[in-house]
Image: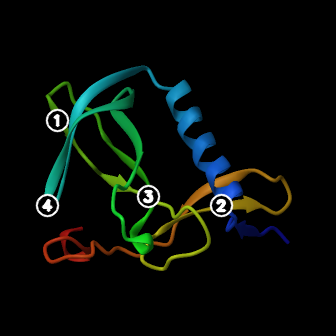
Amino acid sequence: MTMFIMLESRTDIAAAQNSLKSTLEAQSDKTVKRTIGYPGGHTPDQWLSAFGNQWFWSGKTSKQDPSARRSLNWFGFYSDEAGVDITVEINTVPEGLNNRIGGFFARHSETGVVYLFHSARVGGGRKGVGRKLF
């Protein structure tokens, strides 16, 4: 029976995050600087990897709250305009499991290949950001 086993160790998650980022960056058509918009704000002047009409960006939160630390994996539709918007956000925790964060990595039980998953839980953490906007 095929299963996926969630990665929980700091070492395994860091390796999976690095692999995701390096794979997508290596396969991109170009790297461009854009302002990334999202409900409630924006992140200016970020280098993102573009793939035709799609883009990827990865970073880390700067929050000091240990329960909010995460790796950010943002995806969206590319535009030649100065800014782009996040379409999909799959953030992961550096270790273990945090039910506030929807993204996680899991290893295929037979092949050993690691995949990025999302729990399908849509949050936002504050008023004006969440399930109703989708």
Give neighbour class at mark 2: few <14, some 14-19, many 20+ (Cα, 10 Å).
Answer: few
The residue that label 1 is drawn on is 83
Give residue 10's mark: 2
- The local secondary structure at tag 1 comes to strand
Q: What residue type is labelled 3?
A: Ile
The residue that label 3 is drawn on is 90
Q: Where is residue 56 in the image (x, y as percent from the top left)?
A: 40, 39
Left/right placement of residue 65 relative to residue 11 reads: left
Q: Which of marks 3 and 4 precedes in the sequence?
A: 4
Q: Position of residue 103 (x, y in %)?
A: 50, 64
Q: Which of marks 1 and 3 precedes in the sequence?
A: 1
- The local secondary structure at tag 3 comes to loop
The residue that label 4 is drawn on is 40
Cβ–Cβ under 8 Å for marks 2 and 1: no
Left/right placement of residue 2 relative to residue 127 reads: right
Q: Which of marks 1 and 2 precedes in the sequence?
A: 2
- Give the distance between the C-alpha atoms of the residues marked 3 and 1, in whole angstroms: 20 Å
Residue at 34 percent across and 55 percent down: it is 62
- The local secondary structure at tag 2 comes to helix
- Give the distance between the C-alpha atoms of the residues marked 2 and 3, in whole angstroms: 18 Å
Q: What residue type is labelled 1?
A: Gly
Single out the mark in the foreground, 2 or 3: 2
Single out the mark in the foreground, 2 or 4: 2
Q: Position of residue 108 (x, y in %)?
A: 76, 59
Cβ–Cβ under 8 Å for marks 2 and 3: no
Q: Which amino acid does label 2 sit on?
A: Arg
Give neighbour class at mark 3: few <14, some 14-19, many 20+ (Cα, 10 Å).
Answer: some
Q: Which amino acid does label 4 sit on?
A: Gly
Q: Which of marks 4 and 2 precedes in the sequence?
A: 2
Cβ–Cβ under 8 Å for marks 3 and 1: no
